[in-house]
Amino acid sequence: MKLAQRMSRLGTETAFEVLAKARRLEAEGMNVIHLEIGEPDFESPENVVNAGSDAIVNGYTHYGPSPGFPELRDRIAEEISSTRGLSVTSDNVVVTPGGKPIMFFAILALVDQGDEVLYPNPGFPIYESMIEFVGGVPVPMQLHESSAFNVDVDEIAAQITDRTKLMIVNSPNNPCGSVIPVEDLERLANLAKEHDIVVLSDEIYNRFLYEGEHHSIAAFPGMRDRTIILDGFSKSYAMTGWRIGYGVMPQELVEPISRLATNSVSCTASFTQIAALEALSGPQESSYSMVEEFKKRRDIIVGGLNDIPGIRCPVPLGAFYVFPSIEDTGMSSQHFADSLLSEAGVASLAGESFGRFGNGYIRFSFANSTENLESALERIRKFVRSR
């Protein structure tokens, strides 16, 4: 069977490939510590689970509106208005099965063949994959370790051309855990306005912030009407398997994005929307206590990695990943990650999985228990010492 040529431009998310490999090793009897996959190791809150199961019993098992249930869209608009300092309504909201559809639909709706898209590198691999899939030109905005894995705004200004259509920002960032300083965020907003660039702001990790407070690029003057905010429930409420996210966008984009949803997924599952409504409206203690636990884990893994000769690990300000340099070990990042899994039973991701500027780095997720993190650190220490 001959595939369409566009399929050759479609990448993947390496975390799921490494997870599958690690599962095969476990089936063969190896004990593996999973630091590769980016999902909280907590259960969904009990009130959310109960709301979802009650919804199924009460008949929320049928089609719903493509942009989402009105009551959920209303509640999301309230949440964004209060947390981002914006004035938005349900008419700005589209609910989707996970956050990725917002990336895909936004890029499909806005990017024509040959249009250029600025995106963070190292960054979430689906950005580059989707840009290339639709025929756009990915233009990497390098994140520099020397500036806490943030961009050089002057460098980005020099990359903008008359073909630049979209800029993707991600703060807190996956894989680096970096947070864009508010002054740089404002400068990026000014570039977007000056050059008439739409911004896709991936804010899925906004609650996973260990110092300071979250700032959205959409909150700067003139940015609400050129910004698409991506957020969801997978991370903040440990609801990865429920597959529910949303976009908050200029009203003129809601209809075309909803039309893309109609043509692809029809709608987001009804019972998950009821569960999401409870997640936003119910008690928040479990969500915030989860973040506090992640902060403790961050400090454990950063301190442990920095005690290993050959590894240099900056402190992430957000998300639940560390992105240490392993260049001084003498190994390439891919060889390091492959060997660490096969020889030491620690699953991780090579930095180049997140783009070419990730070479020389490794991503570890600290979404695992303190006990497992400490065990993983000891395995990594022995692994590096044996080289």
Image (tube, rainbow, N blue to C red):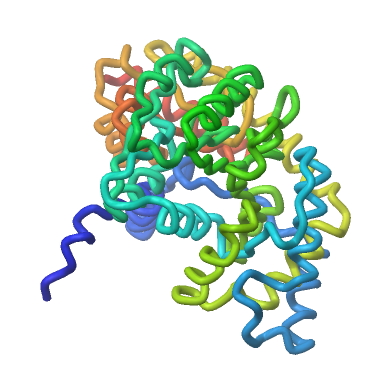
Can you give x and y, in whole percent of width and height, for residue 78 in the image? Answer: 82, 53
Residue at 53%, 40% in the rendered image: 199
Residue at 75%, 61% in the rendered image: 90
For residue 186, side relative to residue 163 (left or right): right
Farthest left residue in view: 2
Q: Quadrant of residue 86?
A: top right
Can you give x and y, in whole percent of width and height, for residue 134 in the image? Answer: 31, 55
Can you give x and y, in whole percent of width and height, for residue 255 in the image? Answer: 57, 67
Residue at 68%, 57% in the rendered image: 92
Q: Considering depth in this image, is 158 or 140 the residue closer to the camera?
A: 158
For residue 81, side relative to residue 14 (left or right): right
Q: Considering depth in this image, is 39 or 309 the residue closer to the camera?
A: 39
**Any part of residue 103 in sight:** yes
Q: Quadrant of residue 353?
A: top left
Q: Considering depth in this image, is 109 or 68 the residue closer to the camera?
A: 109
Can you give x and y, in whole percent of width and height, for residue 11 in the image? Answer: 29, 51
Looking at the rendered image, the quarter that the N terminus falls into is bottom left
Q: Considering depth in this image, is 223 or 340 the residue closer to the camera?
A: 223
Q: Is residue 1 above or below residue 46?
A: below
Looking at the rendered image, the quarter that the C terminus falls into is top left
Q: Quadrant of residue 61?
A: bottom right
For residue 277, side relative to residue 173 (left or right): right
**Any part of residue 368 in sight:** no
For residue 193, side relative to residue 274 (left or right): left
Farthest right residue in view: 283
Q: Is residue 173 above or below residue 76?
A: above
Residue at 59%, 43% in the rendered image: 227
Q: Is residue 129 above or below residue 67?
A: above
